[in-house]
Image: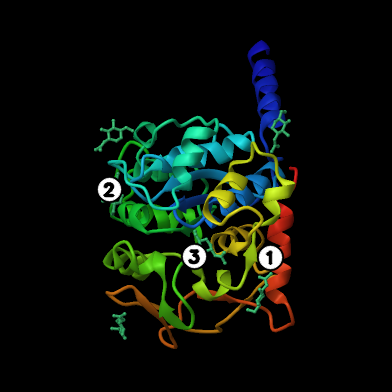
Amino acid sequence: MLIKYTQVAALALLASTAPFAYGHSVPKLIIDTDIFIGCDDAAALALANLFHARGQIELLGVMVNTPSRFGAPAVSAINTYYNHTRIPVGALKPVDNSTAAPDYARLLATAFPGYVKDGADAPDAVPLYRQLLAGQEDGAVTVVSIGYLENLSGLLRSTGDVFSHMGGFELVERKVKEMVVMGGQYPSGREYNFYNDNPSLTDFVIDQWPTPMVFTGNEIGSNILAGAVLTDHAPATDPVRAAYIATTGAGLNNYTWDPTAVMYAAFGLDDFFVYGNDVGSISVSSNGSDVWEKHPTKDQHYLAFPKKKDANVTVANAIDRWLVAKP
Ligand SMILES: *[C@@H]1O[C@H](CO)[C@@H](O)[C@H](O)[C@H]1NC(C)=O
Ligand SMILES: *[C@@H]1O[C@H](CO)[C@@H](O)[C@H](O)[C@H]1NC(C)=O
Ligand SMILES: *[C@@H]1O[C@H](CO)[C@@H](O)[C@H](O)[C@H]1NC(C)=O
Ligand SMILES: *[C@@H]1O[C@H](CO)[C@@H](O)[C@H](O)[C@H]1NC(C)=O
Ligand SMILES: *[C@@H]1O[C@H](CO)[C@@H](O)[C@H](O)[C@H]1NC(C)=O
Ligand SMILES: CC(=O)N[C@H]1CO[C@H](CO)[C@@H](O)[C@@H]1O
């Protein structure tokens, strides 16, 4: 009896400290970010941390898909600002000193508190993906890709390990409900995340990914200007504010591609977006350009703005409210 009581007490304790009530399932996100050059990665992580604090999503982990040693510490600085110091951060290895101007990741890594000091100390992204996926129920996870597709390519090609006997494809097919991708341009075009790194990896991941995908293209974020509000309405201790000031300048808005992927992963279309297609699927060419083909039809969609006046302003205003909101 004593043992039983202890077990009940332990379960009760678990329940009371778990961020989400049992039975209420919220989207479980893993975000894969390049976190350099564009400050919208920082904004996307701010939104994810806010939604996590509010119990609207569970942020399982964040992966960095550039080799910069400052990437993982920059992510940890943003998580730390939101008091989420246990969210695991994975890194593409080996890390190096590469930077990109404007290098806000180095600023966040060196001038703000965080729990990862150097990307070299972070776990490798691919095994961390495998560990996080293996620990979840089937079909529970949403992957949010807001940068290069390096780690995701590594994940698909991975083989059985201590976390799961399944290979990468099977593990993804089992555990990942859908992938939301900031990348490409729709219905056709050529966008940075798809071409700048390694288009053949992009092509491989997008072509082979075994579960549904939703894309938010260049034309969405290029028409959403936000973030200026951080300068006057966020504290100096907010690393996302620092990222905006360092890249865009104080009191100025910038393009908002990546936060739209987090919004969709958390809330679906909501009143913010519609699907731009009924049928078809994406095709990525070897130079990283993409085109939406009528055939074959797969479970794939790209986002568009609803056909009403100022649809982009509505999204920009929501993002600005979230960027300066208290959990
Ligand atoms: C983090 O925790 C501190 C101390 O409890 C609190 O003052 C602060 O508002 C929290 N920050 C956020 C972004 O929730
Ligand atoms: C990277 O920078 C550190 C100092 O920040 C230096 O000690 C190290 O030698 C550099 N590594 C390379 C490969 O340049
Ligand atoms: C909305 O889109 C229009 C037309 O592209 C643009 O001029 C305007 O700056 C955008 N507004 C916001 C808040 O993003
Ligand atoms: C956004 O920031 C980049 C630097 O990251 C800058 O080159 C660009 O001009 C900015 N765009 C706007 C609309 O301010
Ligand atoms: C990329 O490849 C596509 C399809 O092969 C082609 O139509 C397009 O012109 C190419 N774009 C560039 C910039 O090379
Ligand atoms: C640990 C691991 O497998 N990392 C991989 C991440 O993905 C890139 C691109 O596929 C690989 O080069 C890395 O080995």
Q: In whole angstroms, how far apart are the C-alphas of marks 1 and 3?
A: 17 Å
Q: Secondary structure beneath disc 3?
A: strand
Task: Choose the circle earlier in sequence order: 3 or 2.
Answer: 2
In the image, 69 versus 306, the foreground residue is 69
Judged left or right of residue 273, residue 77 is left
In the image, 254 versus 165, the foreground residue is 254
Please identify, in this view, whether the residue under mark 3 or under mark 2 is nearer the observer: 3
User: Which residue does the image show at 52% across and 54% down from the upper left?
Assistant: 247
- Residue 159 is labelled as 2
Please identify, in this view, whether the residue under mark 1 or under mark 3 is nearer the observer: 1
Task: Choose the circle earlier in sequence order: 1 or 3.
Answer: 3
Q: Secondary structure beneath disc 1?
A: helix
The quarter holding residue 191 reads bottom left
In the image, 233 versus 313, the foreground residue is 233
| Mark 1 CB lies closer than 8 A to ligand 3 | yes
User: Looking at numbered disc 3 in the image, what kind of residue is underneath it?
Assistant: Met
The quarter holding residue 172 reads bottom left
- Residue 250 is labelled as none
Query: Residue beneath label 1, please?
Result: 316
Mark 1 and mark 3 in contact? Answer it, CB < 8 Å: no
User: Which residue does the image show at 52% across and 34% down from the upper left?
Assistant: 111
Say whether residue 324 is visible: no
User: Looking at numbered disc 1 in the image, what kind of residue is underneath it?
Assistant: Ala
CA neighbours of label 2 inside 10 A, class few (<14), some (14 to 19), many (20+): some
Quarter of image, ligand 2 = top left
- 7 over 159 or under it: above or below: above
| Mark 2 CB lies closer than 8 A to ligand 6 | no
Q: Secondary structure beneath disc 2?
A: loop
Query: Residue beneath label 3, please?
Result: 182
